[in-house]
Image (cartoon, rainbow, N blue to C red):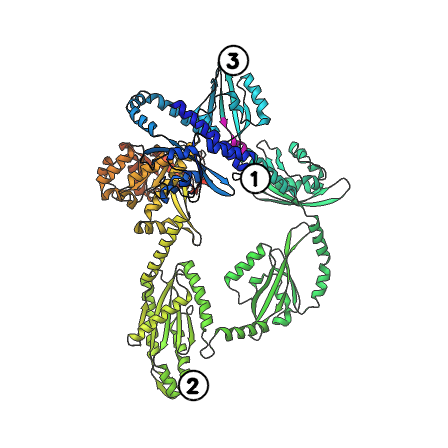
Amino acid sequence: MADEIQRLQDELRDAHRRLQLAADATGPLGGDPSKALLAGVFRLSPVAISLSRACDGMYVDVNDEWTRLMGLTVQDVVGRTTVEIGVWTDKAQRDAGVKPARESGRLRNLDFPFTRPDGTKLILQLNASHIEIGGTAHLLSYVKDVSAERAAQAALLASEQLLKASNNRLSQQVRLFETMESLASVGYWTSGAGVGGLRWSKGLYGLAALEPGTVLEAAAARSRIHADDLQQFAEARAKLDGSMLEYRWHHRDGRVHWLRSRMRSWSEDGSEAFGVVQDITDERETSLALQERLGFIQKITSRLPGVVFQLRLKADGSFEFPYISDTVRDLYRGVTPDDLMRDASCTLKLHHPDDLEAFTTSVRASARDLSPWRHEYRLRFEDGEVRWLLGHAMPEREVDGAVLWNGFTTDVTSRKQAEESLRDSEARFRALTELSSDWYWEQDEQFRFIRVDRNLESFNELPAQSLVGVTRWESDALGVSQAQWAAHRAALAAHETFHDFEMQRRHVDGSLVWASVSGTPIFDAKGCFKGYRGIGRDITARKRAEEKIERLAFYDVLTELPNRRLLMDRLQQALVASGREKSTGALLFIDLDNFKDLNDTQGHDVGDLLLRQVAQRLVASVREADTVARLGGDEFVVMLQKLDRNVATATAQVEHVGKKILRQLNQVYLLGTLEHHSTPSIGVTLFEDHQQTMDELLKQADLAMYESKSAGRNTLRFFDPAMQALVARRTELELDLRHGLQRNELVLFYQPVVDAHARVVGVEALVRWQHPLRGQVSPAEFIPMAEQTGLILPLGQWVLEVACLQLVRWSAHASTACLSMAVNVSARQFKHPEFVQQVLDLLRETGANPQRLKLELTESLLLTDTQDAILKMTELRAVGVRFSLDDFGTGYSSLSYLKLLPLQQLKIDQSFVRDVLTDPNDAAIARTVLALGQSLGFDVVAEGVETVGQRDFLLKNGCTLFQGYLFGKPAPIELLQLGDRSLAS
């Protein structure tokens, strides 16, 4: 039977290959000879073959063997779907069955039941391939009756169990070897005398993507070797001396893979040999990508207007150039990169003798202080030409103590010539300034006035000499805040050009006049800063005009209070300041009760008198920093800022101001000869941290004001946005998190855990949320919400899956295979009835080593149902999963449950580690936890270690595992540093 199965499989593969080649070459079956041959193979093949559309399973054609096996005619089948003839029960089953063919192009060995029209029940096996015919996706399917095989398999099951038991130990060893082959992308072959003497290992078949047993002869084995490499392979095969050989292989995936091999003889006459083969495609592609990248860098640097270089000062005091771009040929006239790499000092002979000492001194000063190197120097060539160069470089200290600069040098001769030309034109500029109505000034290096020319005396009627020897901020300048002075002085210190710095001076008649000053720094021929020069002008008329325009635009004409426009501007600033300073503010919306009656009975002029007096009383009731504005009619708004951060205290402060306003506005008004009594209705809303828009705040205050009127007028009412804002934010955050899980916005960061020698032994996985609009959302914000809404379940499952997949990737490399992965498990996730099964399924599906997975639980989680916790932990511990008690010492910390729970590790909470050197209580707690862990046989990890002193204290007291910023911040996997770190670091 086995021989018959093998024969049919060979025919199936041969027919499939010829059919695919013909389909690719000619399209749908046609009339040329190749198509006729293809049609003949299809029709007369002893294997049951069908062709159906991939999109809906409708049959296009079947061969004679298929109709015989299925008991159906071609007319019964063509034009009908696989569901309609009973291959699949429904479309969903069909889609699931052919899914592998859509994804990988092939469907292999799928058994399915089928009942023929005559009632015969069969077990059929389906193999299929995904092919394109005429631009349409089809499935080429092969069906085989395996009913007898399955019956025979059932009969042989008992004997197979006995054979399986006897071979169990050998199978385990074989699987171990095959696993090693798979992990290392390695296989081997052996060959002996005679036909069929060639044997391939399973790993080699997997590496070549061939079916086991398909390569039996050397010719077949060599058929996929690249033609250009076949001769060197044959020579190495003939020598069998163990030398390394790299060659190319035409893989079944269509790519050319690179293989590395060693071959030796294991018999004296050379008739028997073996070879080891490794797939090094990734290694070669990485090397090629690196070469391409280096070529790209060389191409880019060759087009820059200067020289890109790396200069190293070695520990022995000598210099070398690890890299220098080809443009050095142009800058140094014929000096090549190879010249400089052989002798780093070969260009010093071109340096101008007057600049050489300063050049070498600047380089060594940069090396000593690790300060950025910036230096201008001259080259003098044999023909007498002098060129100016400017060099920039950033130094860094290397492990062996050497200093490496990465820098850029460019020719600045044109700029230096321009500076000289600028100095030559200074005299002409000075002559022109004498004709200007503005005044000209100069300052020295300490920004003291050394010269003031022309029109200043007409500006303030003071002698210009009174300014000489003082700085601008030491003169009698007014109208400049401390922040503006600080910014101005910073610009001067940075030698920046400044424009239109505005200030006031007191005129001799007592009036204030405005001046606008602009200036630019002065440098000498060597680039040394020498001071400032600039101009000033009288802008008093302009400022007065601007002030008048501003009052018309931003102030109410009747009351001289800020109008709505200015209020909105100040409210916007207040909202920004509130968010920055975390302070509270308030809006009081004030409406005069029955104001319309006064206007209607006494006239608008009397009403205007009342509005002006109300404005005055409001201004007198608040602080100078607060804002009183008139929106229009009898509506006023008071904005209070910098209230207490505590909402309750801020509310009391606002209530105090509101009552004060009520008292003030309830007093009698004298409107000409009329005594009038008026009352206000006040609505209040609080704001903090920019949580509401300006329109929302005004609307809330307005609503509160109407609430005040509804309460009988002449009173004050608050708008309470707390619950509304809380519900809205939580709803929005929950929806965003749901979308974030679907859109893969969450990412795992990893923080290293190191041993006493600062070697990384594991990491803790920490979830982060990179929101497309909010930016990075703090876990403290979305984790509690996820707990409450149940989103913690899919979130926690995602974290476990990503962590397990990372463990699998690490297991492929010897340097990371031993790393453990700690994952925090929430209370809701741990208590889920399917939690244990979900973890087991995840470990099985990903192939992660459970010995490397560590689940971190909290004390409060374990105390709610200790028995359930013990059962779940024990079941997972049985497969190798380890458990750690997180934040130990911050909760109940009962010794009774410590001895009951299958824990392997305690983590000292960072709140104790933070002050372990300054707080005796924290130090005592840390010692106690370490002693407790040692006595119970637990590993103890100290969290939040940020200083060497903390680490040394913990190490001295027996702690061997550490986690904290001292050893590494949480980082995404691409930035995670897993190399050894010394204690000195």
User: How many C-alpha atoms fall within 10 Å of the one at disc 2: few (<14), some, or many (≥20)?
Assistant: few
**Residue type (three-letter) at the residue carrying disc 3:** Gly
Q: Percent position (x, y) of residue 590?
A: 37, 74
- Closer to the camera, 257 or 729? 257
**Residue type (three-letter) at the residue carrying disc 1:** Arg
**Residue type (three-letter) at the residue carrying disc 2:** Asp
- Helix, strand or loop at label 3? It is loop
- Helix, strand or loop at label 1? It is helix
**Circle 3 residue:** 270
**Circle 1 residue:** 368
Quick check: 670 above or below 911? below
Q: Quick check: is 897 in the magenta stretch?
A: no
Q: Percent position (x, y) of residue 447?
A: 60, 58
Q: Evaluate if marks 2 and 1 touch, with contact meaning CB atoms under 8 Å apart.
A: no
Q: Evaluate if marks 2 and 3 touch, with contact meaning CB atoms under 8 Å apart.
A: no
Q: Percent position (x, y) of residue 181?
A: 44, 26
Quick check: 762 above or below 201? below
**Circle 2 residue:** 605
Query: What secondary structure characterizes most of the magenta part?
Result: helix
- Closer to the camera, 829 or 917? 829
Name which residue lies at 72% across and 64% down: 431
Gap in angstroms between the C-alphas marked 2 and 1: 80 Å
